[in-house]
Amino acid sequence: MGNDLIRRGQERLTPALSFHTDIIVKKAEGVYVESVEGKRYLDFSSGLATVNIGHCPPEVLKAAKRQMDEMVHSGCIFRYASEVELAERLARITPEGIEMFFFANGGAEAVEGAIKLARHATGRQGIIGFMGCFHGRTMGALSLTTSTARYRKGFHPLLPSVYHAPYPYCFRCHMGMDRTSCETECMEYLERILRYQITPEEVACMIIEPVLGEGGYIVPPADFMRKLRELCTRHGILLIADEVQSGFGRTGKWFASEHFGLKPDIITMAKGIASGFPLSAFGASKELMSKWPPGSHGTTFGGNPVSCAAACATIDTIERDGLLEKAARMGEYAMGRVLEIKNRTKGIGDARGLGLMIGVEFIRPDGSPDKARLDGVMKKCLEAGLVIIECGVDKNIARIMPPLTITKEEMDKGLSIFEEALS
Ligand SMILES: Cc1ncc(COP(=O)(O)O)c(C=O)c1O
């Protein structure tokens, strides 16, 4: 069955899709995924940072099924409760100033909407992104994505008037600086863009991942985020926080922006929002949202009633079970263990993260990225029943991102497999 399904998939699914594993799933539940051969895997990938409260959470399935019995699709023809109820919940949990929402289907779509809103509301065209960020693969989002040039290869010309400044990746600084002596040289480079390439009054927005995801699980210095907010405010530039990966409790808070006291003008979210049902959103203040008239943006499937019901239940479950606090606690515990492993093991250059968004960077003795080592470690982990995936432009960074519901025993089991695979 296994090999046959893979062969049939190769026959009929576009080769553009690349799968991280060949596991064919019979059942996924909580932190575990079971293959058709009956092998159980601990899932430290959370279905790409999406099933934040575990696979198939019962409360979410119940809410989705209830909604399915009533209505599955509206297409903006009919009004329904789950979308409004979700917007009300989001207004409560998003950073201060975010009051209204547009619902779409996936992360890239939320990013597209966010930059459209920024251009429409400001009447400006320029967009500034940060080197290493991933924002999706539709043409607008791809123009901002620079987690690797491979994603952009073959698709130029991309959106014009998009510029990129360095993301503060202090372990491997884009500016060649040293962590101990640098006073956010990246910020100075960004200011240089505004002097040499595009005037601030032509810039609609800057978009940043508050914790870098696909680009390497990198936490920026708080000072950089503070200066970025100040710079945007000074020039009337809208700041978009792309929280598609870092949101919904992944870092131990609803949104990673909160760690920096960052109040974005626009926020994007997807992945963990609905526990795997397709849904995304971007939010902004009422004042900003009221700047574009009806029809400026739209969607047939966005804000699907079933997905919205699943998202409401996801938020309720996170609140009821104290999963933010749990993720923060478990993240601290995991980071402690990962740092011990790093100290015991040659070839780990850096371990960093917030909450359950932890990156482990593999390096060769000369400090260069060691993808081959991580490939070997991931393969051994898989054999031992642990799914770990990589990130970073050189694919040499392991992501530790299990569901927030993970227990200490499950965390210990996963990290022990990880450590054994290193030897
Ligand atoms: C920060 C960020 N933005 C946008 C996206 C795009 O989301 P999607 O794949 O749902 O289009 C991703 C996906 O990984 C992401 O991590």
Image (cartoon, rainbow, N blue to C red):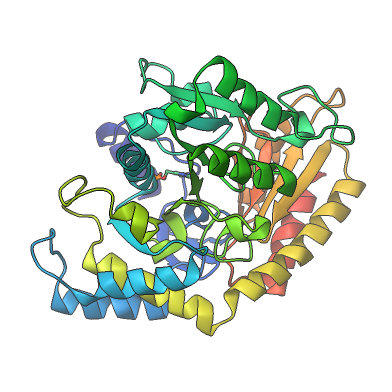
Residue 345 position within the rendered picture, expressed as x and y whole percent measured from the top left: 88, 44
Q: Nearer the viewer, residue 337 or 233?
A: 233
Q: Residue at x 41, y 22 (%)?
A: 161
Instruction: Residue 345: tell me if it is visible.
Output: yes
Q: Residue at x 78, y 66 (%)?
A: 333
Q: Nearer the viewer, residue 420 or 347?
A: 347
Ligand 1 position by quadrant:
top left
Residue 39 position within the rendered picture, expressed as x and y whole percent measured from the top left: 53, 60
Q: How many numbered marks are there?
A: 0
Q: Nearer the viewer, residue 408 or 294?
A: 294
Q: With 422 as the anchor, is 153 left or right in this view?
A: left
| Residue 66 in which image quadrant | bottom left
Q: Residue at x 63, y 65 (%)?
A: 252
Quadrant in the picture for the C terminus: top right
Q: With 181 as the anchor, is 128 left or right in this view?
A: left
Q: Is residue 316 above or below residue 218?
A: below
